[in-house]
Amino acid sequence: MSDAAVSTGPLLRVRNLKKHFSAKLSMFSREKAKVRAVDDVSFEIQPGETLGLVGESGCGKSTTGRAVLRLIEPSSGEVQFQGRDILALDKTSLRNIRKEMQIIFQDPYSSLDPRMTVGATIREVLTVHNVGRTRKERDERVADLLHTVGLSGDHLRRFPHEFSGGQRQRIGIARALAVNPKLIICDEPVSALDVSVQAQVVNLLQDLQAQYGLTYLFIAHDLSVVEHISTRVAVMYLGKIVEVATAKDLYTNPRHPYSEALLSAVPIADPTKKRDRSVIQGDVPSPINPPSGCRFHTRCPLRMPSCAVNHQVLTEVAPGHLVACQVRTGLAGEPDIG
């Protein structure tokens, strides 16, 4: 990972971001409910660092990333990129700034148009953003990008179905790099790949970050991958961030009960060693009707009566280590474990 972070402030600042969807309660009902996919999320990313965003499937990670880029429109909140309010931009201004904010999608199969060659897919990005003056210049740029991600320039005339999953994801990475972005949202970029290929793609992302000074928001549910690539990690549960810390601090000293449970489920490579499991009881509540107070209190072994009432705020328990838990931050009394 790059240490190119500078002291001019965060590259990306997200404040109180919300994304609510409308959904019918049943196919026979006209009544609509509000799905709180992302509900008051705030974080910052410094230039050159990688912020890992982790949590169970359905917690709102991918929706957060897409809302930051306005691929889906946020319900409310503030997103600032290099001090500019992304949510206030018109279509022309947004297209211009998207040259500096790109995304790598989760599925390398559906994210590429099967009717377009690899060269046409990447060249389209250059054409839309007016990079290169002639077709020849753009083809040369495409060939250079393919070499950068470990493919051959000869591949630009092939179609997506002629590549493996790992190769397709490399094509997706090349497409994201085409316009020299500063920020890349990595939306679970290795979850659809074989384990052996995952390591290759993660190492490629790290090499590219060091080479080009990239900044990543790395969304994933595989905690071992996140530990390897992240500078800091934010843990998300049911639309809210419950803990933020450096990767080292989070993996050695998690403070939120949900973070502890997630980390206890990570397999240990040594078969002779065993990890003490912290098993979470119950099911994830519905984002249509989330629990009051702390959203994790219905499954938390440390819950107190006040947890069901009090809104949990991220509180600094150590330098750079924020936790949204009144029990662990010393703002509550004895746990209610009955």
Image (cartoon, rainbow, N blue to C red):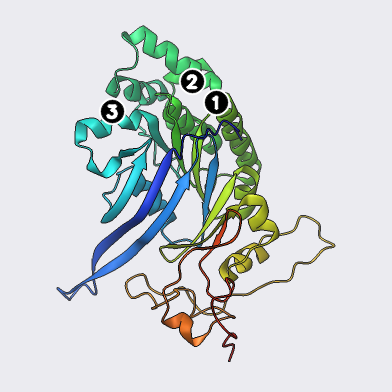
Label 2 with label 3: CB-CB less than 8 Å:
no
Q: Residue at x 45, y 44 (%)?
A: 107
Which is more foreground, mark 2 or mark 3?
3
* Front residue (pair 334, 22): 334
Q: Residue at x 54, y 76 (%)?
A: 331
Picture quadrant of residue 104 = top left
User: How far is disc 2 from disc 3 in space, using C-alphas?
Assistant: 21 Å
Label 2 with label 1: CB-CB less than 8 Å:
yes
Picture quadrant of residue 76 = bottom left
| Residue of label 2 | 145
* Front residue (pair 6, 105): 6
- Which numbered tag is attached to residue 132? none
Picture quadrant of residue 223 = bottom right
Q: Residue furthest bottom?
A: 338
Marked residue nearer the N-terminal end (1 or 3): 3
Circle 3 packing at 10 Å, graded few (<14), some (14-19), many (20+), is few
Secondary structure of the residue carrying tag 1 is: loop
Picture coordinates of residue 11, whole percent (x, y): 44, 37
Which residue type does callout 1 highlight?
A: Val
Marked residue nearer the N-terminal end (2 or 3): 3
Picture coordinates of residue 257, whole percent (x, y): 59, 71
Image-based side of 13 in relation to 26, left or right: right
* Front residue (pair 184, 15): 15
Which residue type does callout 3 highlight?
A: Asn
Secondary structure of the residue carrying tag 3 is: helix
| Residue of label 1 | 149
Q: Is residue 151 visible?
A: no
| Residue of label 3 | 96
Image-based side of 131 in relation to 200, left or right: left
Question: The N terminus appears in which quarter of the rendering?
Answer: top right
Image-based side of 11 in relation to 279, left or right: left
